[in-house]
Amino acid sequence: MTGRDTVDDMFEQHLSPDAAAGHKAAKASTPAGPFFRVGLPVGLEAGYGLGGLLTLLDAEGWYGERTLTWGGGHTFTWFVDRKNDWCGAVGFGGRERGEGCLSL
């Protein structure tokens, strides 16, 4: 499917310096910021690998450096943390608020 070199390349920063600056600003100051951050804390150094958000430093108590993660809106997310040797995926079905739904 993919060679070792391709997999290693997925976990490298692929944003140019200008794109990285725009990405950082979008994560910090736009309403879409939480979606770009995929649950990571504000201010965490992150870039973009081939396929998702890439942590550039360790996040204490969270992901290791070079973790690749992606969130598909409110109903799906996955991560691969090669440094700490763990990964995960979570998905659930969502419905619009309305009849038959409980609003909290």
Image: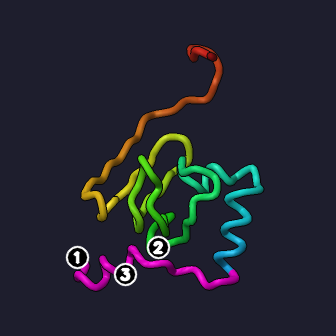
Q: Residue at x 49, y 78 (%)?
A: 13
Which numbered marker is on residue 9? 3
Question: Could you tell me the amino acid type at mark 2?
Answer: Gly
Residue 49 x %, y %:
47, 73
Residue 66 x %, y %:
41, 68
Q: Which circle's residue, 3 or 2, is located before the other in the chain?
A: 3
What SS does tag 1 mark? loop
What SS does tag 2 mark? loop
Question: Could you tell me the amino acid type at mark 3?
Answer: Asp
Q: Which residue is mark 1?
A: 1
Q: Which residues are magenta?
A: 1-18
Quarter of the image with the C terminus in it = top right
Q: Residue at x 65, y 20 (%)?
A: 98
Nearer to me, 44 or 81: 44
Foreground mark, 3 or 1, reads 3
Disc 2 + disc 1, Cβ < 8 Å: no
Q: Which circle's residue, 3 or 1, is located before the other in the chain?
A: 1
Disc 3 + disc 1, Cβ < 8 Å: no
Q: Quote the CA–CA distance across marks 2 and 1.
A: 18 Å
Q: Which residue is mark 2?
A: 49
